[in-house]
Image: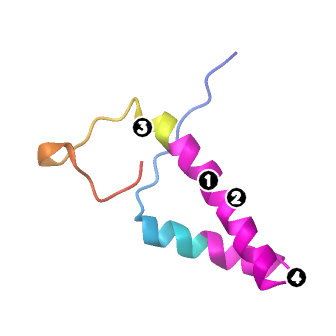
């Protein structure tokens, strides 16, 4: 299987949650459905980000970054 190119987006966790929530509330019929949709989207995004981060080398001293990669 061919490896797809990775696009790096630097963002904070707060920005990611806000964006997922905004889209979820726009496309859902109730608050409960929106929270569930945002939750599932964030789980998938974070799961994929963790796998992608295995190839990422931190640029900050001490290996800690305030960005999700």
Q: Residues within 10 Å of mark 4 (few under 14, many from 20)?
A: few
Q: Which residues are magenta?
A: 20-49
Q: In terms of image quadrants, where is residue 23?
A: bottom right
Which numbered disc flags the more N-terminal residue, 3 or 1?
A: 1
Which numbered disc flags the more N-terminal residue, 2 or 4?
A: 4
* Labelled pair 2, 1 in contact (Cβ < 8 Å): yes
Toward the viewer: 44 or 36?
36
* Labelled pair 2, 4 in contact (Cβ < 8 Å): no
* Residue that sits furthest to the front in the current view: 32
Relative to residue 66, is residue 32 depicted above or below? below
Q: CA distance from mark 4 to mark 1?
A: 21 Å
Q: Which residue is mark 4?
A: 29
* Residue 9: image location, x then y, percent: 46, 53
* Quarter of the image that includes the N terminus: top right
> In the structure shown, which secondary structural element does the residue marked by tag 3 occupy?
helix
Residue 46 placement, left or right of 61: right
Of tags 3 and 2, the one toward the viewer is: 2
* Residue shown at 66% from the left, 18% from the top: 2
Relative to residue 7, is residue 43 depicted above or below? below
Relative to residue 15, is residue 4 depicted above or below? above
* Labelled pair 3, 2 in contact (Cβ < 8 Å): no
Relative to residue 10, is residue 63 depicted above or below? above
Query: Which labelled disc corresponds to residue 40?
Result: 2
Q: Residues within 10 Å of mark 2 (few under 14, many from 20)?
A: few
> In the structure shown, which secondary structural element does the residue marked by tag 2 occupy?
helix
Q: Is residue 58 magenta?
A: no
* Residue 27: image location, x then y, percent: 82, 76
Q: CA distance from mark 2 to mark 1?
A: 5 Å
Query: Which labelled disc corresponds to residue 43?
Result: 1
Q: Which residue is mark 3?
A: 53
Considering the whole magenta stretch, tell me its main secondary structure.
helix
């Amino acid at each position: 299987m061919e490896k797809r190119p990775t696009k790096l987006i630097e963002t904070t966790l707060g920005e990611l949650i806000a964006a997922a929530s905004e889209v979820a509330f726009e496309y859902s019929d109730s608050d409960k459905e929106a929270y569930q949709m945002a939750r599932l989207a964030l789980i998938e995004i974070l799961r994929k980000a963790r796998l992608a981060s295995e190839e990422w080398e931190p640029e900050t001293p001490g290996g800690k970054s305030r960005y999700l990669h």
